Image (spheres, rainbow, N blue to C red):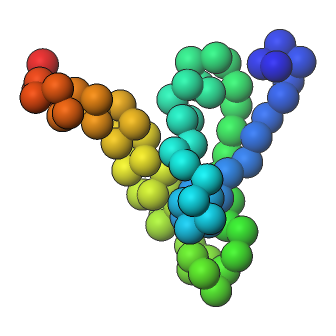
Amino acid sequence: MADAGVRACFAPVQEMTQGNGPLGLGRLRAAGLRFGLGVDVVPASGGDLFTQMRCALAQERARLYDPMVLEGSDPKS
Protein backbone atom coordinates (compact mmCIF):
# COMPACT_ATOMS: atom_id res chain seq x y z
CA MET A 1 0.00 0.00 0.00
CA ALA A 2 2.84 2.39 0.80
CA ASP A 3 4.34 1.82 -2.65
CA ALA A 4 1.01 2.80 -4.17
CA GLY A 5 1.04 6.10 -2.23
CA VAL A 6 -1.88 5.22 0.01
CA ARG A 7 -2.44 7.66 2.86
CA ALA A 8 -4.85 7.53 5.78
CA CYS A 9 -6.48 10.00 8.15
CA PHE A 10 -7.59 9.13 11.67
CA ALA A 11 -9.66 10.90 14.31
CA PRO A 12 -8.31 9.14 17.43
CA VAL A 13 -10.85 10.45 19.95
CA GLN A 14 -13.77 9.49 17.74
CA GLU A 15 -12.26 6.08 16.94
CA MET A 16 -11.89 5.41 20.66
CA THR A 17 -15.42 6.70 21.41
CA GLN A 18 -16.83 4.27 18.84
CA GLY A 19 -14.86 1.40 20.35
CA ASN A 20 -12.81 0.70 17.22
CA GLY A 21 -9.74 -0.27 19.23
CA PRO A 22 -6.20 1.09 19.13
CA LEU A 23 -5.03 2.75 15.95
CA GLY A 24 -1.61 1.11 15.67
CA LEU A 25 -0.05 4.18 14.08
CA GLY A 26 3.46 2.90 14.79
CA ARG A 27 2.77 -0.18 12.67
CA LEU A 28 1.57 2.02 9.82
CA ARG A 29 4.73 4.13 10.02
CA ALA A 30 6.90 1.00 10.12
CA ALA A 31 5.13 -0.20 6.97
CA GLY A 32 5.90 3.11 5.26
CA LEU A 33 2.34 4.44 5.21
CA ARG A 34 1.83 8.15 5.69
CA PHE A 35 -1.10 9.30 7.78
CA GLY A 36 -2.64 12.36 9.31
CA LEU A 37 -4.87 13.16 12.24
CA GLY A 38 -8.22 14.89 11.98
CA VAL A 39 -11.40 15.71 13.87
CA ASP A 40 -14.57 13.84 13.00
CA VAL A 41 -17.46 14.75 15.30
CA VAL A 42 -16.64 18.10 16.93
CA PRO A 43 -19.39 18.03 19.62
CA ALA A 44 -18.16 14.61 20.78
CA SER A 45 -14.42 15.28 20.79
CA GLY A 46 -13.78 19.01 20.61
CA GLY A 47 -12.30 20.69 17.60
CA ASP A 48 -8.64 20.98 18.52
CA LEU A 49 -5.95 18.80 17.00
CA PHE A 50 -3.84 18.82 20.18
CA THR A 51 -6.45 16.60 21.85
CA GLN A 52 -6.27 14.25 18.85
CA MET A 53 -2.46 14.17 19.06
CA ARG A 54 -2.49 13.44 22.80
CA CYS A 55 -5.03 10.66 22.32
CA ALA A 56 -3.06 9.10 19.45
CA LEU A 57 0.14 9.21 21.51
CA ALA A 58 -1.57 7.64 24.53
CA GLN A 59 -3.09 4.88 22.39
CA GLU A 60 0.25 4.08 20.77
CA ARG A 61 2.05 4.01 24.11
CA ALA A 62 -0.61 1.71 25.54
CA ARG A 63 -0.29 -0.59 22.52
CA LEU A 64 3.49 -0.76 22.91
CA TYR A 65 3.82 -0.98 26.66
CA ASP A 66 0.75 -2.89 27.83
CA PRO A 67 2.22 -6.35 27.07
CA MET A 68 5.35 -5.40 29.02
CA VAL A 69 3.34 -4.17 31.99
CA LEU A 70 1.28 -7.35 32.03
CA GLU A 71 4.47 -9.43 32.02
CA GLY A 72 5.85 -7.38 34.89
CA SER A 73 8.78 -6.09 32.87
CA ASP A 74 9.98 -2.49 32.76
CA PRO A 75 9.03 -0.75 29.52
CA LYS A 76 12.12 1.47 29.78
CA SER A 77 14.58 -1.41 29.71
Residue farthest to the bottom?
43
Q: Residue at x 17, y 26 (%)?
A: 71
Q: Residue 58's x, y, as percent?
A: 37, 50
- Say which quadrant the N terminus sits in: top right
- Say which quadrant the C terminus sits in: top left
Q: Residue at x 56, y 18 (%)?
A: 30
* Number of numbered labels in the structure image: 0
Residue 49 appears in the rendering? no
Residue farthest to the right?
4
Q: Is residue 74 above or below residue 16?
A: above
Q: Residue 67's x, y, as percent?
A: 28, 29
Q: Is residue 43 above or below residue 37?
A: below
Q: Residue at x 66, y 80 (%)?
A: 42
Q: Residue 19's x, y, as percent?
A: 57, 59
Q: Residue 61's x, y, as percent?
A: 35, 40
Q: Residue at x 42, y 57 (%)?
A: 54
Q: Is residue 44 above or below residue 66?
A: below
Residue nearest the viewer, comparing 51 with 60: 60
Residue nearest the viewer, comparing 63 with 10: 63
Left or right: 18 in relation to 59: right
Residue nearest the viewer, comparing 71 with 15: 71
Left or right: 40 in relation to 13: right
Residue 53 appears in the rendering? yes
